[in-house]
Image (cartoon, rainbow, N blue to C red):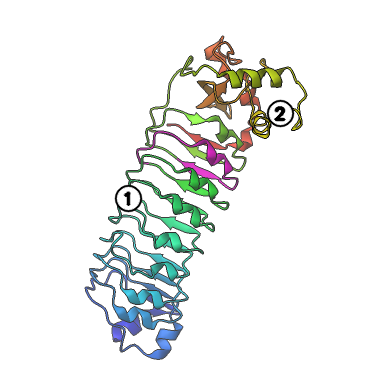
Amino acid sequence: MEAFEGAYGGDIMDLSRLNLNNLNFDNLSDKRRKETRQILLCYNRLTVLSESISLFENLEFLDISCNALGVICDDITRLTKLRTLIAKNNRLDEFSLPKDFGSLQLEVLNFSGNRFEEIPTQFLQLQRLQSLSLGGNRLKTIPADIENLTSLELLYLGGNLISSIPVELANLPYLSYLVLCDNRIQSVPPQLNRLHSLRSLSLHNNLLTYLPREILSLVQLQELSLRGNPLVVRFVKDMTYDPPSLLELAGRAIKTRNLIYSARDLPAHLVTYLDLASKCPNPKCAGVYFDSCVRHIKFVDFCGKYRLPLMHYLCSPECTSPCSSNPQSDADSDDEHSVPADRLQRVLLG
């Protein structure tokens, strides 16, 4: 244990890059155990994390990255003061964790560069978690229960096999940094406009062809990375359109003519239906729509430099967008003027 004693610097024990293949802290003095707040075990050859790690009752930070770990010992759950666990570049998967791993009071968790094919349920039980990094794994989906991590501020899932974004992701009130680059994502749910704290959204190297226009309401967004996506290169018109039902036609007539109605005049379900009317975004059109609309993709200029394809919903095929008569002059539409330069400081398309 002399080597361990020599590895001390204040409350930090640095045992990184020592080519260690096993560890045992049983003979370390009680004084050292209690004083230790951080342990660095990265860049060794460990295949198993010693159960004696639980002897460090005041441990707050543990880095076991870049080893050959295939399992996390059950005793790690006894580290009640552990706040940061970094285990990058090992051989861990969803079966490597103790059953009670979710009982830890972790705030930062980084398991990037491992072999996870799904996000373990134990991770989704970490109520205090603020930062979760699982980049460079083999994840195919993001579970709906991700919404349970209500304290999350950073979510890094880049470099996986994810094909879709669940709408439940929008229920994370403090999420500020969302990294989903280098996946297989084809669309972004419009519900992400509820991420009012979002400052950075990384979507580069996916399969995106457009973004929902609701992204304009992300008022805190400062960085949007889109490079490496098959974004459309021209204004696309006359996409799918389902003719409106008789109910919708009647509803449109009531709304566009500003007819007065109340719960005394109509059944409750019809009043509710009328309240769901969406205004056509074309400022030259006073129309509304309910379920039937024309989907258009139009480009919007941000900061006078970057052109971003956004999905528009128009009330009918006859309702052209303000710029459709001159597709090369999209910079004059109302959408561009509604987005100040300081709203989106960087849009990275190339």
Residue at x 42%, y 67% (from the top left corner):
102
Between the C-alphas of marks 1 and 2, the distance is 56 Å
Identify the main secondary structure in magenta.
loop
Answer with left or right where residue 69 lies relative to residue 155.
Answer: left
- Figure quadrant of residue 265: top right
Q: Nearer the viewer, residue 182 or 305?
A: 182
Residue type at mark 2: give it: Leu
- Image quarter of the C terminus: top left
Which of the pair 140/244 is nearer the observer? 244
Mark number displayed over residue 341: none
- Which secondary structure lies at badge 2? loop
Determine which residue is flagged by label 2: 266
Q: Earlier in the sequence, mark 1 or mark 2?
A: 1
Q: Residues within 10 Å of mark 2 (few under 14, many from 20)?
A: few
Residue 9 spot, x, y in % from top left? 42, 78
Tell me, yes or no, if residue 287 can be seen here. Answer: no
Query: Against 266, is 132 above or below?
Result: below
- Residue interval drawn in magenta: 182-202
Residue 317 magenta-highlighted = no
